[in-house]
Amino acid sequence: MNDTLPRVVRRPTPKSIPAQAELLEPTSCESDVVFTGLLRARQEEDAWIVQARHGEQDAFVQLHNRYYARIYRFISCRVKRVQDVEDLTQQVFLRSWGAIGRYEPGSSPFSAWLFTIARHLIASEYRRKPTYELGDGPVDRRPGSDPENVAVAHWQQERLACAIAQLLPLQQKVIILRFSRNLRARQIAAVIGRSEVNVRVIQHRALRQLRNILKDEAAEEVGAF
């Protein structure tokens, strides 16, 4: 496997990337339709993975386009400088292209594999460059705030933000509208143009995925010591 990305893969900015992940989002308020859409997208992705494992560059381009924006957002919530974010995002796909033959379909979701590569690259950069900067986040800086509590709160906020960044775009929107802006399902449905039932389905799946992401990251952190 080559250690360079397929020639047709570019380094687009997130705004220039079509929301390929929208293919995985529910398009109906009925759960069975949601499941059918997810299954179809997963089957399509599995086919791309098999082809990429056999060296087919066009298939890897499809995977790259589907996940580039999500990986970029994930890294950008942990790393401050735009150039560093772009470089690390590119490295994630360089690493995954070079190691695609070792990825075992069915062992874990392909997206989880990519995010694991991203976390390892970020950690490696922190070790290599001690001054590597985290992304900014809201921190309680009121007079009298306990520095230790502020640091813990900042870490928790960043951890949650990075977990949310791994969700699909529509899942992110629903979670933010529900828990940051405190909108009810009916109000969220009006904002995103979906039914109230569909909003509840999206929220349920997103919260379940968030729990799994945070659980997996906690296990990795424990294993690192």
Image: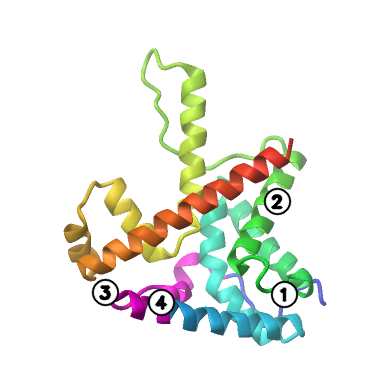
Q: What residue type is labelled 1?
A: Leu
Name the image quarter holding residue 90: bottom right
Q: Quote the CA–CA distance across marks 4 and 1.
A: 33 Å
The reply to whether the C-beta atoms of the residues labelled 4 and 1 are less than 8 Å apart is: no
Q: Quote the CA–CA distance across marks 3 and 2.
A: 38 Å
Q: What residue type is labelled 3?
A: Cys
> Which residue occupies 81% across, 76% down?
2
Disc with the residue nearer the chain's start (4 vs 3): 3
> As rendered, which of 182 and 88 lies closer to the eye?
182
> Which residue occupies 34% across, 54% down?
175
* 68 on left or right of 204: right
Disc with the residue nearer the chain's start (4 vs 1): 1
Disc with the residue nearer the chain's start (3 vs 2): 3
Q: Is mark 3 on a helix, strand or loop?
A: loop
Q: Mark 1 points at which residue?
A: 5
* Above-or-below relation of 118 to 31: above
